[in-house]
Amino acid sequence: MDIFEIENIWFFIGVLPVVAFMYSAVGHGGASGYLALMALFGFAPEWMKPTALLLNLFVAGISFYFYWRKGFFIPKLFWVFAIASIPLSFIGGMIEVDDAIYKIILGVLLVFAILRMLNVFGKSNDKIRDVKFLQGTAIGGVIGFFSGLIGIGGGIILSPVILIFRWGKMKQAAAVSALFIWVNSAAGLAGQLSSGVSLSNDVFILVGIAILGGTAGAYFGSGKFDNKFLRYLLAFVLATASIKLLFV
């Protein structure tokens, strides 16, 4: 697939770094946003998942670096989720989903992301509790499998889970989710490639563009950047894509 044959591709290229900026500012890789954009611009479903995972690898990695440098990363909180998520994300990445089912699942997932960005649930709490090993691995495994299946890193799900159960504060959840996204994206992409999926060389143009936005977002987001406006703007983008996927 030649991305430059897609209608209005230059507008897509202009919006992509903005999405990467917004997601990385809150500690995410941006896969749900990239998938939303690709759905809006008519990308082929079989091209969407591996592309989103590759973009996630770079943007989530950058986001993690900035949050880790600020001291927000808690290794123990990461590993309890990652142990089961990595192999199950690989398995999920090997499974093909029917186009119609794929769009419905993605549309519903974007509704979840909208609620997260609007802080409908998952607000930070000062009373932090330890996560139990079996509980964490079970949750991580389910998120990992679903992440590989749909083509996301899982941070958009893990962040609110950490906050709802009070396993970490907002910035800690962002740091853990960023690395969680990275390992799941790597495993999911490996599963995709092992099942015969290939990436177009054009995708690396998108990678370079996403890195620009992701670096700026992670730099400001890991500091004292106010994410309120970004969350509302991002929720609008995701709502538009979700409506298109579910009802158009």
Image: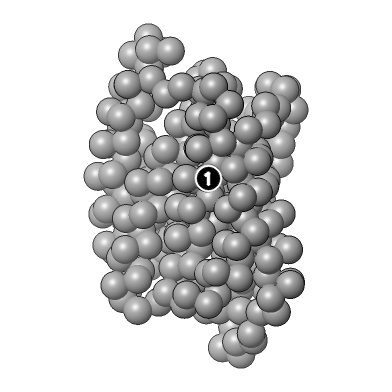
- x and y percent of residue 192 in the render? 55, 31
* Quarter of image, res 163: bottom right
Quadrant holding the C terminus: top right
Q: Nearer the viewer, residue 81 or 228?
A: 81
- The number of discs equals 1
Q: In the displayed structure, does residue 162 sit left or right of residue 31?
A: right
Q: Is residue 238 above or below residue 178?
A: above
Is label 1 in a helix, a strand or a loop? helix
* Quarter of image, res 39: top right
Residue name at image x 68 percent, y 70 percent: 136
Residue name at image x 51 percent, y 59 percent: 180
Residue name at image x 65 percent, y 59 percent: 84
- x and y percent of residue 159 in the render? 57, 64
Q: In the displayed structure, does residue 244 sit left or right of residue 73?
A: right
Q: In the displayed structure, does residue 108 sit left or right of residue 116?
A: right
Q: Crowdedness of circle 1 by 10 Å Cα count: few (<14), some, many (20+)? A: many
Q: Nearer the viewer, residue 47 or 6?
A: 47
- Callout 1 amino acid: Ala
Q: Nearer the viewer, residue 207 or 80?
A: 80
Coloring scheme used: one colour
Quadrant holding the N terminus: top left
- x and y percent of residue 36 in the render? 53, 34
Furthest residue to the top? 5
Q: Is residue 29 visible?
A: yes
Q: Is residue 41 visible?
A: no
Q: Which residue lies under the disc numbered 1? A: 187
- x and y percent of residue 104 in the render? 72, 32
Q: Is residue 184 above or below residue 8?
A: below
Residue name at image x 35 percent, y 79 percent: 71
* Quarter of image, res 218: bottom left
